[in-house]
Image: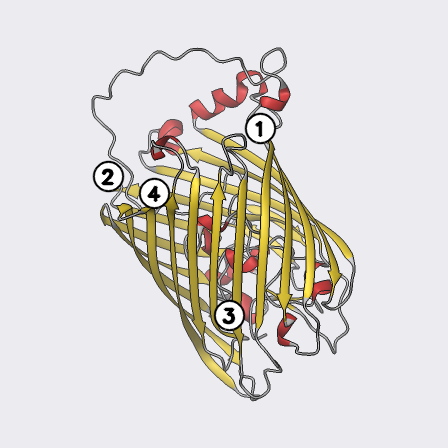
Amino acid sequence: MRSKMWRACGGRFVGPLALLAAVGQASALADDALPPEDPIEIAEAIPNDLPGHEPGPRTRPAPVSEEPAPPEPEIPEAPEWFGGMPFWEWSRLTGNWGGARTDLEEWGLTLAGSYTMDWTNVVSGGRRQESSYRHLIDFNATFDLEKLVGLTGGQVYLDFYSLAGDGASEDAGDFQGVSDIESGHVDQIAELWYEQSLFDGIVRLKIGKVDANEEFAFVEAGGEVINSSASYSPTLFTLPSYPDPAMSVNAFVYPCDWFYAGAGIYDGATQDGHSTGGRGPATFFSDSTSSDWFLIAEAGLTAETLGFLRNARFAFGAWHHSGTFDTFDGGADDGTTGFYCVGESRVWSPTPDEEESDRGLYAFVQYGWADPEVSEVENHVGFGLTLRGVCDGRPDDALAAYVSWVDLSDEPGAGFDEDETALEFAYGIQVTPYFVLRPDIQFIFNPSGDASRDTAVVLSLRASVEF
């Protein structure tokens, strides 16, 4: 297997889950395979705006005051429950469970869940003009160990998801992935980790089964679009991310308010054909099953204010996978390496007090490089704009535009005629605080680098509900 990307012409997400020697789970994949003469590779990335999925912080947490100021009196609000607020005003579909949810959070347990559904239709071009549907159900729990057992700065996180459906990229025939939740049929405990903050937040450690994209290469401002490349550069084709998080050890340091650096070592067994998404730590500790590792490091600069920029972040990362990779000329390479850069910032805000609102225009840019002898993508460039709070009358809606270009390998044997470019426009309609509808249109030029394939025009409708 040359990369971790899911090949639509063959599934591989089957295996027992023995997570941290305590959890058992089975997962399976059943998908409609494409003809073997026309394989499609799909980049994978979980949506980065799911409730309960928080990216790793990029600034040191503010120190807790030893003598906090007394809280200002609050005006009691109507409860988010029957007999209180109207249900369409609740922040989550299931409300506050008659106060039980708040009680649990005060004790140290935060529960979150969501349902995400995509309907897509390739209206012209691509591989075939078809409609398709897929969904992702996600449940997670965060245990605050300071509240539960008095361990300051500690927390445990558990995440389960179930996904089913495919067809979007099979129909469009694209490489990058028109839907970031398309990954066949999987049911698994995807993440289980322990995190500890030390020395007043200067050091943060995370150990366990982790989605690497929640720690590295993410772009928070890209959460309003659904193309997979907006989550992380497809040059990171070995990244242990959705639907294959992996056992890992991660460490970050925050020596000052404007700089951070971190690194992680992950189980690289996916390269040996073992789906880490359906496994526990066995292949992380056992060389007899797999001796592959994925290593990654990232350093970045952050600034609350930098000229006209607000909440800016600029980061550089490098990665290495120790496995054996098939080269396009029929040989093999021991290990492969790449790097990436990301930048994002709010460039304009309509509100005088920016701290009280996240409304404004956000811009982000991505670049990635990988070895073209083993990677289908040598260079990737992505650029996006997101307007949060479209107008005063729709302060919670979001309008987004994104363009992503992949420089597909020119190596003999790679089989690409051209490079692929994806252009996307999306509008997120906040119907209620817990329900979002997102109409979306994408134009895929030279899908999968096939010059004979017409530009794919893909219409999508995403519905997201927070439980």
Between 287 and 415, the one nearer to me in the picture: 415
Alpha-carbon distance for marks 4 and 1?
29 Å
Mark closer to the chain start, 4 or 1: 1
Horizontal side of residue 192 vs 131, given as left or right:
left
Q: Which residue is mark 4?
A: 196
3 and 2 marks in contact (CB < 8 Å): no
Residue 63 in view here? yes
Q: Which residue is mark 1?
A: 92
Say what amino acid the circle numbered 3 marks.
Ser
Q: Which residue is mark 3?
A: 288
What is the crowding at mark 4: few (fewer than 14 residues within 10 Å), some, or many (at least 20)? some
Is label 4 or label 2 in front?
A: 2
Is label 3 or label 2 in front?
A: 2
Q: Which mark is residue 200?
A: 2
Residue 210 in view here? no
Mark closer to the chain start, 4 or 3: 4
Q: Position of residue 277 (x, y in %)?
A: 57, 56
Is label 2 or label 1 in front?
A: 1
